[in-house]
Amino acid sequence: MYNTQKPNMEDLPSTGQLLRSTFIAFISAMVILVTIVLPAEYAIDPTGIGRVIGLTEMGEIKTQLEKEAEEDRKKDAAAKQQSFLFKLFISTAHAEEAKTKEENWKDEKSFTLKPGKGIEWKLIMKKGQAIEYKWRAENGRINYDFHGDGASGEVSYEKGRGKKGAEGAFTAPRDGKHGWFWRNRDKKDVTIILQIRGDYDKLIQTY
């Protein structure tokens, strides 16, 4: 049924021949490893043959390049870590500074106005004195007039209608009283919180 002739046992390699072939292949592989692969890849040359044929120098160059690349990776990682820590430190410092500045108010007043009611608070200041201020309206909106004493009456610096708050800086243009008048035109109670810091003599309610 099959045309293939069955090989004779005499034609097959013996166990000894197979072992010799395996041993020769192993020795050849080891020789190639020691004389070519190790010098060319890792600059390891136990026989000296690799340096003679120039493979060891190739391995040394490759090893040096890998070492420099690893050092560069470590430097980049260290630089990134330092940059992260620096940014974290700066952000924390700024946050603490902002928090400290936010809490460092010379005066803070809170009052509630019923619908239709008004109130006035003023600072007694000398010409050239400067302040920072912030006020906000809670539970509603408010009308306001930031004004001061003038030679012929009151002088308005800033007005607003239906506002939730304001903040800024102010320098007194003359000796006198300078401050805010708020009126609640809403149909519900509105609470106002006023915060001030800077140079002024006194904060008083005038209406």
Image (tube, rainbow, N blue to C red):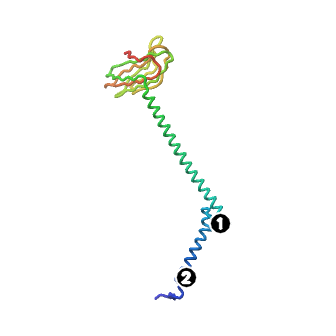
**Label 1 neighbour load within 10 Å: few <14, some 14-19, many 20+:** many
Q: Residue at the spot x=36%, y=21% of the render?
A: 183
Question: What residue occupies the far front of the structure in this picture?
Answer: 46
* Residue with the mark numbered 1: 50
SS at badge 1:
helix
Marks 1/2 in contact by CB < 8 Å: the verdict is no
Q: Nearer the viewer, residue 124 or 69?
A: 69
Q: Earlier in the sequence, mark 1 or mark 2?
A: 2
Q: Quadrant of residue 55?
A: bottom right
* Residue with the mark numbered 2: 17
**Amino acid marked by disc 2:** Gln
* x and y percentages locating residue 96 in the rendered image: 45, 33
Q: Considering the image in quadrants, where does the C terminus appear?
A: top left
Up-down: is 69 above or below 177?
below
Up-down: is 185 above or below 68?
above
Up-down: is 42 above or below 92?
below
SS at badge 2:
helix
Name the disc covering residue 41, or none.
Answer: none
CA gap between label 1 and label 2 equals 32 Å
Q: Residue at the spot x=58%, y=51% of the render?
A: 71
Up-down: is 31 above or below 10?
above
